[in-house]
C-alpha cells in the first residue's frame, strides 16, 4: 500500500475518531482513558510554563493514568520526528500528544501527523490561534526576554543591540538549537526585528546577521541555555521566554540573583499549540489530557507558571483568575509593544534561520 494511501486512511480514521469523541460524555472519556492506563508526553520540562504542577494535577485528578514523559528537553522539530519515527510503534516511545511552536502545528497537520479533537471549551479559544477542524490549537503565549545572572553581569542589557557590547564576552546563549527549537528560532527572528528586519524572511536574515556579529565578537555561547547553566555562570545571559525566565528566577531563589529583562525593541510574542498524534497509542488519554489543559484548572496552572493561557481573556471576563497570579506577572507596560508574528511570517523566518544558521553564524549549539 502506498504511503499516500496510508495517509488518506489515517486521516479518515482520525476524522471518525474525532466525530465519535465529540459524542462522548466526560464520564465515558475518563473511563476509556483509564482503561488505556497511560499518557505519553514529550518535551515538557517541569520548569517550563509550570508543567510540573500541570502534570501533577492531571495525575492527581486521574490516578488511574500513568504519565510517561519522553525527552523533556526536545524541541518542536524533535517532537514531530518522534511521531514519524514511531508511527508503527504502540510502545512507550510513541508520543500521544505534542506541544509545539505555532508554525509547527499546520506543518504537522499537512503531513498527516495529527488527528482532530475539539475540547469542550473550544469556543473560548480565539479563532486566530486554532485550526478550524481541531487538528491543533493555541495553549499559551509569552514574550522573549533576557534572563541575567546578576552575580556575573553588573550592567543589565536593555535591548538586543546591548548584547554586542564587549562586557558581555562569552555570556549570551539561546535556550535551544536554532536549527530545531521554536524558542531559539523566534529568538533569532526577534533580534532581526530589533535590527530593522520586517517580520518574515527579512527578520530571519537580519537575525542571522546579528548572531553572526555576536559570535564573531566572542559574546555568543554555543550552549543550550537553561536555569542550571545560568546559575553556574556558563551562560550568564539566556534568551528565553519570559515565563521560563521568571520560573527559573523563582527556582534559584536569589542564589544567584536573576533579573528578567523584556528588551526595548524586538519584543516578539510566541504562541505554542497543542495537538494529538495521528498515531497516538492512547487516544482517549490524549483527549482527556486536552480537556484538562483547556479547563479553568489547567489554564490557571499555566498562569501560575507565568504563561498567559490562551483562554486568559475568557477567564478574566468571568473573574475566575486569582488576583495573586495577576499581581505576580510583569508590568503590563513591558508587553505594550509585543508583536505577534503571523504563521506566514514565522514560517518564512523559520526557513531562513534553519537553512542559514550553519553557513551564516557557524556555531553548533549543543
Image (tube, helix red, strand yellow):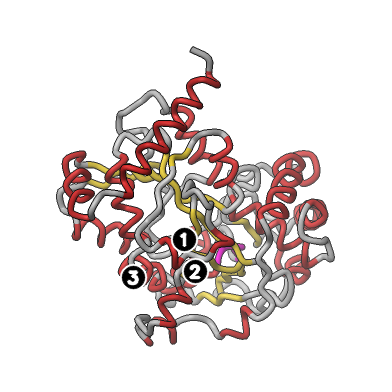
Residue wearing tag 3:
296
Q: Residue at x 23, y 49 (%)?
A: 29
Q: Is residue 15 above or below residue 162?
A: above
Density class for disc 2 (Cα within 10 Å; few <14, some 14-19, many ≥20) is: many
At mark 3, the secondary structure is: helix
Q: Which residues are magenta?
A: 237-241
Q: Residue at x 46, y 60 (%)?
A: 139
Q: Earlier in the sequence, mark 2 or mark 3?
A: 2
Q: Residue at x 75, y 71 (%)?
A: 162
What is the distance, in whole Å, between disc 2 and disc 3 at their CAs?
A: 19 Å
Q: Earlier in the sequence, mark 1 or mark 2?
A: 1
At mark 1, the secondary structure is: strand
What is the distance, in whole Å, between disc 1 and disc 2 at their CAs?
A: 14 Å
Question: Magenta span: helix, strand or loop, mainly?
Answer: strand
At mark 2, the secondary structure is: helix
Residue wearing tag 1:
139
Q: Residue at x 49, y 69 (%)?
A: 243
Q: Earlier in the sequence, mark 1 or mark 3?
A: 1
Density class for disc 1 (Cα within 10 Å; few <14, some 14-19, many ≥20) is: many
Q: Nearer the viewer, mark 1 or mark 2?
A: 1
What is the distance, in whole Å, between disc 1 and disc 3 at their CAs?
A: 12 Å
Residue wearing tag 2:
243
Q: In this rendering, would 243 be left or right of 52? A: right
Quadrant where the C terminus is found in the figure: top right
Q: Picture coordinates of residue 252 (x, y %)?
A: 41, 70
Q: Is residue 240 magenta?
A: yes
Q: Which mark is residue 8?
A: none
Contact (Cβ within 8 Å) of mark 1 with mark 2:
no
Residue 4, by quadrant, is: top right
Amino acid at each position: 500500500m502506498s504511503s499516500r494511501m496510508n495517509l488518506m486512511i489515517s486521516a479518515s480514521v482520525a476524522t471518525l475518531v474525532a466525530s465519535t469523541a465529540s459524542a462522548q460524555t466526560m464520564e465515558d472519556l475518563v473511563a476509556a482513558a483509564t482503561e488505556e492506563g497511560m499518557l505519553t508526553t514529550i518535551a515538557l520540562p517541569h520548569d517550563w510554563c509550570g508543567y510540573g504542577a500541570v502534570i501533577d494535577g492531571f495525575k492527581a485528578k486521574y490516578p488511574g493514568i500513568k504519565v510517561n514523559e519522553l525527552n523533556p528537553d526536545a524541541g518542536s522539530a524533535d517532537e514531530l520526528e518522534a511521531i514519524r519515527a514511531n508511527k508503527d510503534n504502540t510502545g512507550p516511545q510513541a508520543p500521544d500528544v505534542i506541544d509545539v511552536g505555532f508554525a509547527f502545528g499546520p506543518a504537522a497537520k499537512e503531513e498527516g501527523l495529527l488527528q482532530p479533537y475539539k475540547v469542550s471549551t473550544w469556543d473560548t479559544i480565539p479563532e486566530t490561534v486554532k485550526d478550524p477542524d481541531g487538528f491543533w490549537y493555541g495553549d499559551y503565549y509569552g514574550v522573549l526576554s533576557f534572563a541575567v545572572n546578576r552575580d556575573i553581569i553588573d550592567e543589565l542589557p536593555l535591548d538586543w543591540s546591548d548584547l554586542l557590547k564587549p562586557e558581555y564576552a562569552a555570556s549570551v546563549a539561546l535556550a535551544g538549537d536554532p536549527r530545531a527549537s521554536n524558542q531559539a528560532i523566534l529568538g533569532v527572528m526577534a533580534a532581526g526585528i530589533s535590527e530593522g528586519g520586517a517580520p518574515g524572511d527579512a527578520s530571519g536574515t537580519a537575525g542571522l546577521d546579528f548572531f553572526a556579529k555576536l559570535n564573531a565578537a566572542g559574546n555568543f555561547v554555543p550552549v543550550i541555555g537553561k536555569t542550571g547553566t545560568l546559575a553556574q555562570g556558563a551562560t550568564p545571559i539566556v534568551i528565553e521566554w519570559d515565563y521560563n525566565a521568571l520560573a527559573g528566577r523563582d527556582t534559584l531563589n536569589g542564589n544567584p540573583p536573576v533579573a528578567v529583562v523584556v528588551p526595548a525593541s524586538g519584543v516578539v510574542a510566541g504562541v505554542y499549540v497543542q495537538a494529538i498524534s495521528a498515531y497516538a497509542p492512547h487516544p482517549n488519554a490524549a483527549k482527556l489530557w486536552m480537556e484538562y489543559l483547556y479547563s479553568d484548572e489547567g489554564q490557571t496552572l499555566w498562569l501560575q507558571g507565568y504563561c498567559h493561557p490562551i483562554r486568559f481573556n475568557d477567564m478574566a471576563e468571568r473573574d475566575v483568575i486569582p488576583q495573586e497570579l495577576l499581581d505576580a506577572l510583569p508590568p503590563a507596560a513591558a508587553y505594550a509593544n509585543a508583536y505577534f508574528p503571523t504563521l506566514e511570517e514565522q514560517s518564512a523566518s523559520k526557513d531562513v534561520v534553519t537553512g542559514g544558521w550553519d553557513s551564516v553564524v557557524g556555531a553548533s549549539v549543543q
